[in-house]
């Protein structure tokens, strides 16, 4: 009897299982039918859709790149003509030129924490649309400025705009892209910044600083009104906000037929257990999160005092201090072209060799560049020149007085060193702290914690740009460059022992 009863139970179990299998959910049937069916051409089409969204979202960072390079246009313009749009003369002290560059970063110190809350509350797409408001106000003030305070206030408003832009776009790109291309996708913002920086220097050669401000104003309005409204929301944000049906449609579009949507959504919910809670900041102040924040704080400190932002804001002034072989605008453009080349190179190799290796190679090149530039500047300031004398049997290097006419000119050295440093910065230590501030944290706290990290990072940026002139006076130009080299050396050790690799890992 017990055996018959046991068999009957098995029959009932099998029958129930068959009923369950006979009526699976519709989305499960679709997942199983599509599993493994994506062809290379379909994958290419899917990646093309992702990259179209990436390009549209990253266009805003073209404007940011122009804004970061704009102080070079201002400094160059003030040397030839200090007129304004309405005619009155405008005057800047050296500290005010530093402040025109630094104010953008100063505004992001309060701006990023607020931006993180806004992005988490209203979503990524609406936040990207909202950037046009403070940005338009800021550039309008610069365009209409009749004195230096108006320019500084305008740059502060612009900083609030770019804090919201950075928090929303970087979070959005990390969440829509496949793991295999996430690094390259995230670096599209840096490539756009590089293109913008080169563009603004080129515009500055033919236009005054206030007309360049007008172009920046128009571009920002175009981005917020004509580009972003046509983008979809981040699917991971939709999952966290319990908008599952919308998330499913987007995930199928972005991930293709191979993905199991139920499993993908379940995993996202598990990694964002506090996503639907009212106290969304409760997960920010945990031991693990704060430990990761400290790692990123250290990277931002090293990055900024290796001259990451200084070289963008003061490339023209650094070249003039060290000596020029080419016309100043041409030399500055070459430096910014190398910044762009570093961004493109990093986008190609980042997902292959990883974040840590990129940072280490970057810091080694920075250290060597500034050691050489410091030595050149020191020798030049001592009225000593390097000369090569050729004898019958060998070449002997000696030091002679600058007035000697037998020497070989080394005027190309400052441009070459700064170009190498610019390339190295964009290759690793410049953009990767921003990337890790997104990748280290899950969706439910990503925008908040990333904003906290980048607020601290921009505090370091403001400090490094603002103390550029005082450090140059106190340490001499040679000492300033050697200090950058010293921070790069410290950064190599820090990266080897502290920084965690995120290549190929899911971030939730």
Image: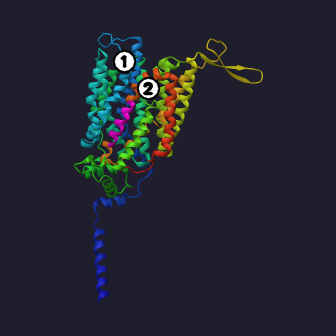
| Percent of width and height locating residue 94 | 39, 17
Magenta part of the chain: 449-461
Q: Which sits in the foreground, 25 or 238?
A: 238
As displayed, is residue 178 above or below residue 14?
A: above
Q: Is residue 4 visible?
A: yes
Query: Would you identify the image quadrant in which residue 57 lies?
Result: top left
Residue where numbered disc 1 is placed: 209
As displayed, is residue 32 above or below residue 244?
A: below
Task: Find out whether residue 455 is within the magenta segment.
Answer: yes
Q: Residue at x 38, y 49 (%)?
A: 507
Q: Which sits in the foreground, 409 or 113?
A: 113
Residue where numbered disc 2 is placed: 198
Q: Farthest bottom residue?
A: 1
| Percent of width and height locating residue 211 | 34, 18
Q: Which sits in the foreground, 474 or 110?
A: 474
Q: Farthest left residue?
A: 278
Picture mark count = 2
């Amino acid at each position: 009897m017990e055996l018959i009863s046991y068999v009957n139970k098995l029959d009932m179990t099998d029958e129930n299982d068959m009923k369950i299998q006979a009526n699976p959910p519709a989305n499960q049937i679709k997942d199983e039918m599509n599993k493994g069916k994506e062809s290379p051409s379909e994958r290419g089409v899917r990646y093309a859709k992702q990259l179209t969204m990436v390009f549209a979202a990253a266009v805003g960072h073209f404007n940011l790149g122009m804004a970061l390079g704009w102080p070079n246009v201002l400094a160059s313009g003030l040397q030839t003509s200090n007129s304004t749009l309405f005619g009155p003369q405008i005057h800047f002290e050296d500290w005010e030129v530093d402040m025109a560059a630094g104010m953008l970063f100063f505004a992001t110190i309060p701006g990023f924490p607020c931006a993180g809350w806004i992005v988490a509350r209203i979503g990524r797409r609406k936040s990207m649309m909202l950037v046009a408001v403070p940005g338009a106000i800021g550039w309008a003030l610069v365009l209409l400025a009749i004195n230096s305070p108006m320019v500084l206030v305008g740059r502060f408003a612009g900083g609030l705009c770019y804090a919201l832009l950075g928090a929303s776009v970087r979070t959005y790109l990390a969440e829509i892209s496949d793991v295999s291309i996430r690094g390259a996708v995230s670096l599209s913002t840096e490539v756009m910044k590089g293109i913008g920086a080169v563009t603004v220097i080129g515009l500055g050669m033919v236009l005054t600083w206030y007309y360049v401000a007008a172009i920046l104003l128009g571009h920002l309005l175009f981005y917020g009104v004509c580009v972003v409204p046509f983008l979809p929301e981040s699917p991971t944000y939709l999952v966290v906000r319990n908008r599952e049906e919308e998330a499913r449609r987007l995930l199928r579009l972005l991930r293709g037929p191979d993905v199991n949507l139920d499993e993908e959504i379940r995993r996202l919910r598990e990694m964002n257990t506090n996503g639907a809670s009212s106290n969304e900041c409760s997960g920010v102040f945990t031991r693990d999160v704060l430990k990761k924040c400290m790692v990123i704080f250290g990277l931002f400190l090293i990055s900024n005092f290796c001259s990451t932002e200084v070289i963008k804001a003061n490339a023209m002034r650094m070249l003039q201090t060290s000596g020029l072989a080419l016309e100043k605008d041409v030399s500055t453009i070459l430096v910014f072209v190398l910044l762009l080349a570093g961004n493109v190179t990093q986008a190609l190799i980042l997902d292959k060799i990883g974040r840590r290796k990129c940072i280490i190679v970057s810091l080694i090149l920075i250290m060597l560049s500034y050691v050489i530039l410091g030595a050149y500047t020191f020798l030049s300031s001592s009225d000593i020149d390097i000369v090569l004398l050729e004898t019958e049997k060998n070449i002997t290097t000696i030091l002679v007085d600058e007035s000697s006419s037998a020497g070989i000119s080394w005027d190309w050295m400052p441009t070459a060193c700064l170009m190498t440093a610019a390339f190295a910065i964009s290759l690793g230590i410049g953009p990767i702290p921003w990337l890790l501030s997104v990748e280290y944290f899950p969706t439910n706290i990503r925008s908040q914690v990333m904003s906290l990290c980048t607020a601290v990072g921009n505090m370091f940026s403001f400090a490094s740009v603002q103390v550029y002139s005082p450090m140059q006076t106190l340490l001499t130009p040679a000492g300033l460059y050697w200090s950058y080299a010293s921070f790069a050396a410290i950064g190599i050790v820090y990266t080897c022992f502290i920084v965690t690799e995120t290549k190929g890992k899911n971030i939730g």
